[in-house]
Image (cartoon, rainbow, N blue to C red):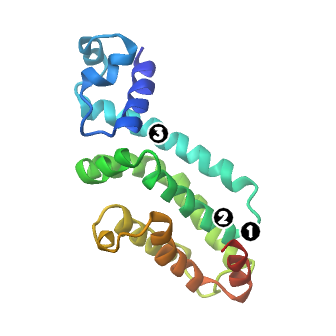
Amino acid sequence: MKEKIIEISLQQFLKHGVRTMTLQKLVLPLGISTKTVYKYFANKEELLEECLKAHYKDADKGLKDMLEGAANPVVSLCAVYAKTAELDFGTNHLFYQDLNYYYPELQDKVIRQYATGAVDTLTGIIKTGITEGYFLDYLQPAVVLDALTVLYTSITRQDVFKKYGIKPADLIKHTIGIYIRGICTEKGLQELNTLS
């Protein structure tokens, strides 16, 4: 029952966002009472944490599947940020918007639990890009990844860019895209230009 509550609640959070969902609304599709939920979870935040764990576990698997057939590190890095932006700003935008605004610490806590795999994957992409001549040879992969993270966080968790009213995909091109372009060698730029 616990897994079913997590599964259905995650679907509800994704569909309606986090803020407006009560425990009663979350379990309505299951036809159970909130009393049953309290057998497994102390409160909405604890349930949300378990939902986030399931969600980021699936996202991590999706990332690995997506990167399996990628042509090269430039394509891989661009694909990761395009997919992440699609999730953050896509049909489930209320979910991420609510997480970023109302539950950033909880989101960060869960991301840290699943981040090791993603950090290793992304660092590996950057290292491979350097080794294969797609990215500048003096780069430190950890610094590049931190810079990308800071940029991405400024897009999703701050209102810095809202005043421009541009679409998320264009915002990514103006920030992450320019940074990726800046770390590319001539060989990397050729690959990048085929994506545009």
Residue type, label 3: His
Residue 146: image quadrant is bottom left
Numbered disc 1: secondary structure? loop
Ranked by sequence position, the earlier of labels 2 and 3 is 3
Disc 2 + disc 3, Cβ < 8 Å: no
Residue 40 percent location from the top left of the image: 31, 19
Taking depth in this image into account, of 79 and 92 the one nearest to the observer is: 92
Numbered disc 2: secondary structure? helix
Taking depth in this image into account, of 146 and 24 the one nearest to the observer is: 24
Question: What is the C-alpha distance between the residues marked 2 and 3?
Answer: 21 Å
Question: What is the C-alpha distance between the residues marked 3 and 1?
Answer: 27 Å
User: Crowding near pointer 2: few (<14 within 10 Å), some, many (20+)?
Assistant: many
Instruction: Determine which residue is flagged by label 2.
Output: 76
Residue type, label 1: Asn
Q: Is residue 124 above or below residue 44?
A: below
Residue 163 percent location from the top left of the image: 29, 73
* Residue 48: numbered disc: none
Q: Is residue 136 above or below residue 24?
A: below
Numbered disc 3: secondary structure? helix
Left or right? Give the position of 129 relative to 119. Answer: right
Residue type, label 2: Ser
Residue 187: image quadrant is bottom right
Q: Quadrant of the N terminus?
A: top left
* Residue 72: numbered disc: 1
Q: Is residue 48 above or below residue 187?
A: above
Taking depth in this image into account, of 38 and 102 the one nearest to the observer is: 102
* Residue 55: numbered disc: 3
Taking depth in this image into account, of 148 and 170 the one nearest to the observer is: 170
